[in-house]
Amino acid sequence: MRIVVAVAGVGGVWLLWKRLKQYLEYRGRKLPPVYREGLHVPLLGAALQFLSDPLKMARRAQDVHGDIFTVYVLGKRLTFMCGPDAQENFCRARDDELSQQQAYNVSVPPFTSPLVYV
């Protein structure tokens, strides 16, 4: 019983830490709206929707929030920019407004790695 209480306590502290860290990192910034419709499970976010049918989920979120929105999936923020107008803002934004380097750090390594993904 004590182990269960200890694990629950550590999990609770970890969750609070993650939320506080997220709040401090993003406070005061103008961020896209977060899609929370449908099945949204704590810690998983919209992962179940995203994994079952990502295109359907993205279209539903676009209908609710417009061309730019964010989805939480497994504790990560995935921001969608649908259509040429939304993507133009990304391409023309200054680095202090929108970090292209963060996006490239995620998307480029799979294509420059000597490993082959099958």
Image: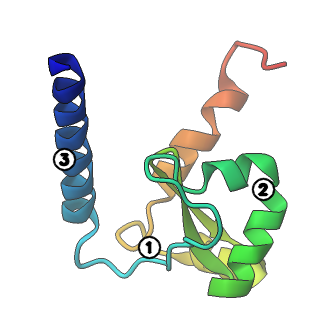
**Quick one: quadrant of the N terminus?**
top left
Above or below 26: residue 2: above
Instruction: Please report the residue visible at 78 percent of the width from the left and 20 percent of the height from the top.
Output: 117
Q: Quadrant of residue 114?
A: top right
Q: Is mark 1 on a helix, strand or loop?
A: loop
Q: Is mark 2 on a helix, strand or loop?
A: helix
How far, Cα to Cα, is label 3 from label 2?
29 Å
Q: Looking at the picture, which amino acid does disc 1 mark?
A: Arg
Q: Looking at the picture, which amino acid does disc 3 mark?
A: Trp
Instruction: Please report the residue visible at 24 percent of the width from the left and 33 percent of the height from the top.
Output: 8
**Quick one: quadrant of the C terminus?**
top right
| Residue 95 on image: x %, y % | 41, 66
Above or below 87: residue 85: below
Few, some or many C-alpha atoms within 10 Å of disc 2 (few <14, some 14-19, many ≥20)?
some
| Residue 72 on image: x %, y % | 51, 57
Sooner in the amino-acid sequence: mark 3 or mark 1: 3
Q: How is the image coloured?
A: rainbow
Q: Looking at the picture, which amino acid does disc 2 mark?
A: Pro
Q: Name the residue under label 2.
A: 54
Horizontal side of residue 5 vs 92, given as left or right? left
Total numbered circles: 3
- Find residue 17 and name its label: 3
Nearest to the observer: residue 41 or residue 118: 41
Above or below 8: residue 75: below
Sooner in the amino-acid sequence: mark 3 or mark 2: 3
* Residue 66 appears anywhere in the view: no
Q: Name the residue under label 1.
A: 94
Nearest to the observer: residue 21 or residue 40: 40
Assess whether mark 2 and mark 3 are in contact (beta carbons under 8 angstroms).
no
